[in-house]
Image: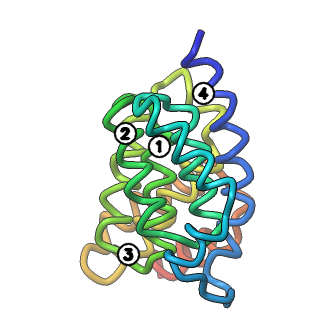
Amino acid sequence: MKMSKINSLFLGLILAGSVSLVNAQTTQPETSAATSQTTNPTIEDLKKQIAANPKDAESLAKLANAYQEASDWPNAIDTWKKISVLLPDWAPAYYSQAYAYQSAKDDANAKIAYEKYIATVKPEEVEQNKKNLAYAYFYLAFTEQQTDPNKAKEHIAKSIQYDPTNQDAVKLSKALNS
């Protein structure tokens, strides 16, 4: 089944992404979108495949990941949005959108995308998404700690529920509850 193949692909991409998510805010050389598009043969090949079949979700996912690897956040975001239109109930697309928005320093849209990710994860998918759910809730708690401390406390509790080993979440929880 095509969805199963896509889920397997994205589970790998998301797990790889969640490992590098911690490093997303470290300093990395900026790559301009124009440079990455013209010098990256993988991106160019995938764009050709998608031009031939715009509804090829697997190729779109590979393209979005290639854009992320090139730090081309605007194109990564646009591509993840296309996937969300094709597969509106597929939670990893929203998580990846949030990651791209966060990397692009667009916190308002990152927050919206993380909320959509949390809302879209199906009960039977929670176990395989625990780390990503923990991070999404942590991000929401972090962004809401000044404006809505009670909501932030709820989010951080959920984050710790999904990943009690996340020391940043534990520290934020202590700060919010002190």
The three-letter code of the residue at mark 2 reads Ser
* C-alpha span from label 1 to label 2: 6 Å
Badge number at residue 84:
2
Secondary structure state at the residue bearing disc 3? helix
Give the secondary structure at mark 2.
helix
Q: Position of residue 11 (x, y in %)?
A: 67, 37
- Disc 1 element: helix
Instruction: Assess disc 2: are there few (<14), some (14-19) or many (≥20) residues with their C-alpha within 10 Å of its C-alpha.
Output: some
Dot 3: few (<14), some (14–19), or many (≥20) neighbours within 10 Å? some
The quadrant the N terminus occupies is top right
- Between 23 and 146, the residue placed more toward the observer is 23
Instruction: Please tell me whether mark 4 sits on a helix, a strand or a loop.
Output: helix
- The residue positioned 61% from the left and 28% from the top of the image is 7
Note whether 50 is above or below 55 in the view shown: below
| Residue ID at (40%, 33%) | 54
Task: Return the residue nearer the eye: 145 or 78.
Answer: 78
Q: Looking at the rendered structure, which numbered label has been put on residue 6? A: 4
> Which residue type carries mark 3?
Thr
Residue 125 place in picture, x, y as percent = 56, 27
Q: Earlier in the sequence, mark 4 or mark 3?
A: 4
**Residue position for label 1:** 93
Asked if disc 3 and disc 2 are in contact, CB closer than 8 Å, the reply is no
Using the numbered discs, state the Cα–Cα distance from disc 3 to disc 1 in whole angstroms. Answer: 21 Å
Q: Residue at x 58, y 69 (%)?
A: 38
- Give the spatial CA distance, label 1 vs label 4: 11 Å
Query: Sequence-wise, which precedes: disc 1 or disc 2?
Result: 2
Residue that label 3 marks: 143
